[in-house]
Amino acid sequence: KQEVTQIPAALSVPEGENLVLNCSFTDSAIYNLQWFRQDPGKGLTSLLLIQSSQREQTSGRLNASLDKSSGRSTLYIAASQPGDSATYLCAVPGGMNYGGSQGNLIFGKGTKLSVKP
Amino acid sequence: DTAVSQTPKYLVTQMGNDKSIKCEQNLGHDTMYWYKQDSKKFLKIMFSYNNKELIINETVPNRFSPKSPDKAHLNLHINSLELGDSAVYFCASSQGLAEGGEQFFGPGTRLTVL
């Protein structure tokens, strides 16, 4: 059964610092891995999707890497800003069941990031 | 234009009532989902539908009944609401069940059962 773990659970950094959020998953047979951002009281915003054949994906100041064999992904945020403060979630598809893909996402519990001015 | 929309955004109701949450996506996706985020902020799948066909029902009480009138809509009806049903419910959609396409989420419906 796929399980996703995110470390740390919370992180507080001063503005301008580069930071890394970690995600690990127990079953390496994944189609892709998705990083989301959730602001308080809001929905989830998709940040990056890395396909299983990719090693990394970049969007602006965000860079996500994927190491399938070791069951790990990292989200690197460069030059952090107070507007980056949010909870960051990583998720992988739930895997195969009854001969077909389930498609649903299995989520980690998130890393709550606070960037102080 | 909103890609995945849900109504209502907030729902406050008494125990024992029946309520519905509606979800619509205008992305042309063929797969839709309902997730529940509990008080500890943990997100967990409830249902998924592919081309209007139920794919997953993750040990959800049968008081919860999803209905998909067409590929663009997946509504959630809840009977006999209980205190433990209080949570935020998110609808999501993606294209291609087998390929595990990128999922897009709605803004959520915060349900409070008194």
Image (tube, rainbow, N blue to C red):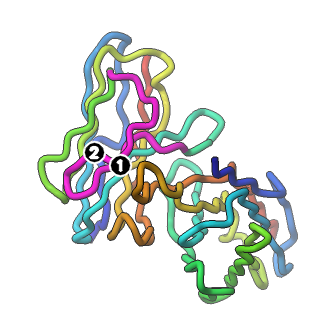
Identify residue type, mark 2.
Leu
Q: Quadrant of the N terminus of chain B?
A: bottom left
Identify residue type, mark 1.
Ser
- Residue at image coords 64%, 59%: A89
Residue B4 lies within the magenta run: no
Rendering coords of residue A33 (x, y %)? 59, 70
Judging depth in this view, the residue of A64 and B55 nearest the camera is: B55
Rendering coords of residue A12 (x, y %)? 85, 61
Q: Secondary structure at mark 2?
A: strand
Q: Chain of mark 2?
A: B
Farthest top residue in view: B16
Check if mark 2's residue and mark 1's residue have beta carbons within 8 Å: yes
Q: Where does label 2 land, which residue? A: B54
N-terminal of the two: label 2 or label 1? 1
Rendering coords of residue A54 (x, y %)? 62, 86
Q: Quadrant of the C terminus of chain B?
A: top left
- Mark 1 crowdedness (10 Å alpha carbons): few <14, some 14-19, many ≥20: many
Judging depth in this view, the residue of B108 and B103 nearest the camera is: B103
Rendering coords of residue A85 (x, y %)? 70, 64
Q: Where does label 1 land, which residue? A: B48
Determine the CA span between mark 2 and mark 1: 6 Å
Q: Which residues are magenta?
A: B44-62
Using the image, determine if residue B25 lies above or below residue B75. Answer: below
Q: Is residue A19 left or right of residue A23?
A: right
Q: How many marks?
A: 2
